[in-house]
Amino acid sequence: MAARLLFRAVIMGPPGSGKGTISDRIVKTFALQHLSSGDLLRLNIQKKTEIGIVAKSYIDQGQLVPDDVITKLILQELNTMRTNSWLLDGFPRTVPQAKALDDAHQINSVIDLNVPFETIRQRLTARWIHPGSGRVYNTEFNPPKVLGIDDITGEPLIQREDDQPETVTKRLKGYEALTRPVLEYYRNKGVLETFSGTETNKIWPHVHTFLRTKLPDVSQE
């Protein structure tokens, strides 16, 4: 059996763009190992590793984790995946992070999910939660029987702070300011592939078709 070529990809997209769903489908369909910077950060904070403690000190002050700290964390983890093809999610978020990643690994493709901010704003601000059970409702496609009330307990639903309109707008603006230069960096290197749309299920077939030109679809085997 011929050895599979290593394939290294980055997926980018604003919060609420469907990045988690698309990432899951890529990983299952093309047998890539998934590395989420957010999950890795949370794990290190939970385990109280040296990097986790430093990162937590910034997060607790409401600050972004510095480039050198998050870069060291990601590159250490990627060093354990040298024989794997992988999909990197949530990193890099700045041009210095992208350059440090390039110095260590050749990136084959950067998948950019370009979903209109208005679509994301509607998607996120339509989400309501029952705090006791974690049940999630969406006023657009999965509304409660009575607006603002949990179907089962009759208790009030809440909106997470992250999903409130002013917070969503702030997060989206922050993402755009931070990552636009990163997208330009990868565009100039010729590895950026942008997929535009308003529905994850309509974007996915285009991502799938593109990746099939690079990788075997193991879900068909």
Image (cartoon, grey):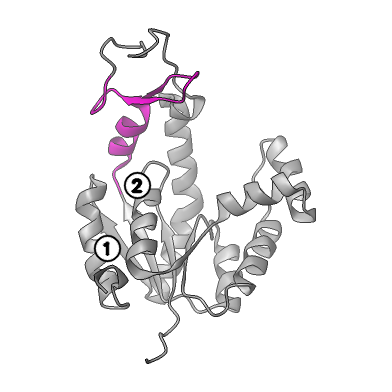
The amino acid on which the numbered mark 2 sits, given as a three-letter code, is: Gly
Of 158 and 178, the residue lying toward us: 158
What segment is highlighted magenta in the picture? 115-143
Q: Is residue 137 magenta?
A: yes
| Image spot of residue 33 (x, y percent) | 48, 66
Which residue lies under the disc numbered 1? 207
Q: Is residue 219 above or below residue 37?
A: below
Q: Secondary structure at mark 1?
A: helix
Residue type, numbered disc 1: Val
Residue indicated by mark 2: 18
User: N-terminal of the two: label 1 or label 2?
Assistant: 2
Magenta residue check for 54:
no
Residue 55 seen anywhere in this rendered image of the structure: no
Residue 60 in percent (x, y) is at: 71, 36
Quarter of the view holding residue 159: top left
Q: Residues within 10 Å of mark 2 (few under 14, many from 20)?
A: some
At numbered mark 2, what does the secondary structure look like: helix, strand or loop?
Answer: loop
- Estimate how packed mark 1 is, as few (under 14), some (14 to 19) or many (20 or more) residues with alpha carbons within 10 Å: some
Distance between mark 1 and mark 2 Cα atoms: 12 Å
- Measuring 68% from the left and 53% from the top, which residue is drawn there? 66
217 sits to left or right of 191: left
Q: Residue at x 37, y 32 (%)?
A: 124
